[in-house]
Image: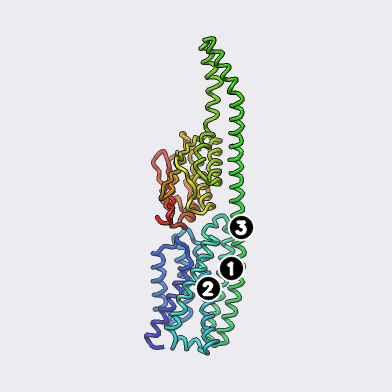
Amino acid sequence: MNYVQMLFYYLFSTLNFYIAGTVTQDRTFSKRRKVCFFCFILILVFFTAPFLNQITTVFGLIGAIFFMIYRTPQKLSNLISFFTGYLVFVCMDYLAAWGWHLFLGVTLQMVRDRYLFVHMLIFLPSLFLTEKGVQWLLHTKFQIQRISGFQPLLWGILGNLAVNVLIFAVLIIFGEQVGYSPEIITFNGILFLAVFLLSSALLTGILRIEKRERELNMQLTQYENLSSYTHEIEQLYQNMRSFKHDYIDMLSSMKFYIDEKNTEQLSQYFYTNILPMGKEMTGHDQQLGRLAFLKNDTVKSLIFSKILLASQKGIHVEVEIREMVEEFPVKEMDLLRVLGIFLNNAIEAAQETDKKEITIAVISDSEKITILLRNSTNLISLPLSRLCERDISSKKNHSGIGLYTAENILNSYENVHWNFSCEMPYFLVELVLYKGGEK
C-alpha cells in the first residue's frame, strides 16, 4: 500500500473500532466520552499499528475497557455493550472478507490495495446500522441498563462476552502471524460466527427470562395495589350504606333534643356522635375522591397503596389533583417503577421527621403533565448531586439503587424532564412529562 492508502486504512480501522465501541452504548454514554475515545483510538492506530500491527488490538481493547468503566455508574452495561459491539464488528469483518473472496475471487490483501475505498463505503454504513440494531436490542428491548437487582446475571453475561473477545483477539493475532489466506479467513469466519451465534442465543435467552420475571413481579405489584384500592372502594360503599342507615336515627335524636330545647344534650350528642363520624368519613375517602381524576387505574391504585402505607406510619398525606388526567405519555411500567421509588423514598424520609408530611400533586395542561412530590425531611448530609449515584444513599442501611434506577429509566425518554431539590424542612421532586414527545 502507498502512503495515501495507508492513511485510509488506518482511518478505516479507527472508525470501525469507534463504531463498535460507542454505537451500542445507551444515552448515558456522554458525547465527551465518545470524543475522548475516538481520539484515543486514532492516536493508538496511527502511532502503534505501523509497528505492532494486530497487537495494537490488545492495547485498543484495554483502553476501551478503561473508557467504559472510568467514572461512570454504568460500568457493567457499558462493558456488555462494548464487548457485544466488538464481537459483531469482528464477525462482520470476516464475513465481508469471505464475501469478497467467495463472490469476486479477491483476497484480503487485494481489498486493502485496490478496493479499500469501495469497501469502506459499503462496510461502514452496514456496520453502523447493525450496531444500531444491537443497541436497540440491548437497551430498548432487554433494557440491560435497568437490571439493577440481578448483578450475578450481568457478571455472567459479561464473563461470557469477555472470553469470546479474548478468543477472537488471539485468533486475529494468530491469523496475522500465519498470513490471512482464504482458508484462514474461512476458518476464522466460521468459528467466529458459530461462537457469536451461540453466545447471542444464550444472551438472548437469559435476558428474555429476566425481563419476563421483572414484568411478572411488576404485574403482581400492580394487582396487589389494585386489590387494595378496590377494597377501599368497597369499604367506602359499606360506610355510605351504614351512614344512610343511621341517618334517620341521627335526625330523630337531634329533633328530640331540639324539641325539648335541651341544648346541652344536643351539644354533647353532636360532639360525641356526629362530629367523629364526619372525621371518619373524610381522610381516605377524600383522597379517593381526588384520585378519581386519574383515569389510569394502575397508577391510581399505586398512589393510594402508598397513601395507606404512609397513614399506617403516622404520616399525613395531602393529594392535589384538580384536572382530569387521561393518559401519561410514557410506558406504564416505567412510570409505576419511578413513582414507586419516589413515593417509597418520601415515606421513609418523612417517617424520620417530626412533621411527617407528604404532598402529592398532579397538574395537567395541553402540553404536559407535572407530578410534584414533597415530603418533610431531616438534614441531608450528602450533596444532592450524588444522590443518583449507584450505592449512594442518604439513609443508613440502604442499597442506594432507587434514584439510580429512576434516573436510568427517565433518561431513556426524550419527552421527560425531572429534578429534585431540598429546601429545609422539605424535599421536592418534580417530574414533567411532555405530551408532544419533545421538551
| Total count of labels | 3
- Viewer-closest of 173 and 2: 2
| 13, above or below 301, in the image | below
**Is residue 25 something one can see in this rendering?**
yes
Judging from the image, what secondary structure is the residue with disc 1 in? helix
Q: Amino acid at mark 2?
A: Val
**Quarter of the image where the C terminus is located:** bottom left
Q: Position of residue 272 (x, y in %)?
A: 55, 19
Judging from the image, what secondary structure is the residue with disc 2 in? helix
**In contact (CB < 8 Å): disc 1 and disc 2:** no
| 346, above or below 51, in the image | above
**Is residue 397 something one can see in this rendering?**
no
What residue would you read off at disc 2? Answer: 88
What residue would you read off at disc 1? Answer: 160
Marks 3 and 1, Cα distance to the nearest angstrom? 22 Å
Q: Amino acid at mark 3?
A: Arg
